[in-house]
Image (cartoon, rainbow, N blue to C red):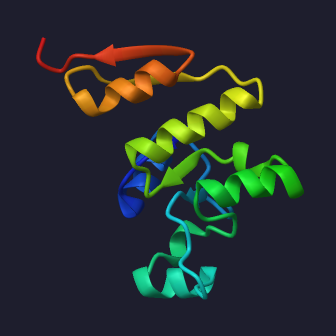
């Protein structure tokens, strides 16, 4: 699973890693504004190629899990990811009995919270 702050680059990286990037391949962790729908967001940011027809935002993911099905947990790309929403998604995966492994840069302090929430973490030091 990839959590990324950048929408456009996420799909390119996933494709290079062999992750399917077709229909329903990404969930934006940025919640929709009141009165905004999926089409508005896609038109505003010009990112129709992400093909996100799934919930937008962590709260919508939780609601979807309770009311519909577990499809949001089967998706492998999450865009608009901040450290806070990434930590929330890790918690959601763990609540669903998933083991969460994180890999990230060990020298970035912003990764500490995410590392501490995960079941197992690996820090990569690019300065060695």
Residue 68 at what x, y percent from top left?
A: 88, 57
Q: Residue at x 59, y 23 (%)?
A: 100
Residue that lies at the very extreme toward the left in this rendered image: 127
**Residue 68 in view in this figure:** no
Q: Residue at x 61, y 44 (%)?
A: 76
State the quadrant of the C terminus. top left
Q: Residue at x 58, y 60 (%)?
A: 57
- Vertical placement of 48 versus 66: above or below? below
- Residue 51 percent across, percent down from the top left: 61, 69
Seen from the viewer's position, the closer of residues 67 and 106 is 67
Residue 76 appears left or right of 105: right
- Is residue 83 visible in the rendered image? The answer is yes
Q: Is residue 8 rendered to the left or right of residue 86?
A: left
In this view, the residue farthest toward the right is 68
Q: Position of residue 82 (x, y in %)?
A: 39, 49
How many numbered circles does the render carry? 0
Q: Is residue 17 placed above or below 115 in the rendered structure? A: below
Does 68 appear above or below 93?
below
Which quadrant of the structure image shows residue 34?
Answer: bottom right
Position of 12 with respect to 111 (left or right) is right
Q: From the image, which quarter does the N terminus lie in?
A: top right
Q: Is residue 103 above or below residue 8?
A: above
89 left or right of 110 in image = right
Counting from the top left corner in percent of width and height, residue 71 is at: 78, 50
């Amino acid at each position: 699973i990839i959590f990324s702050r950048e929408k456009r680059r996420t799909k390119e990286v996933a494709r290079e890693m062999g992750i399917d990037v077709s229909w329903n391949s990404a969930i934006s962790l940025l919640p929709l504004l009141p009165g905004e729908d999926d089409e508005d967001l896609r038109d505003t940011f010009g990112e129709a190629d992400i093909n996100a027809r799934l919930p937008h935002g962590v709260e919508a993911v939780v609601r979807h899990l309770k009311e519909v099905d577990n499809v949001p947990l089967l998706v492998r790309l999450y865009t608009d990811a901040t450290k806070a929403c990434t930590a929330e998604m890790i918690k959601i995966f763990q609540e669903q009995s998933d083991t969460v492994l994180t890999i990230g840069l060990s020298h970035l302090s912003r990764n500490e919270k995410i590392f501490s929430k995960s079941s197992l973490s690996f820090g990569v030091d690019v300065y060695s």
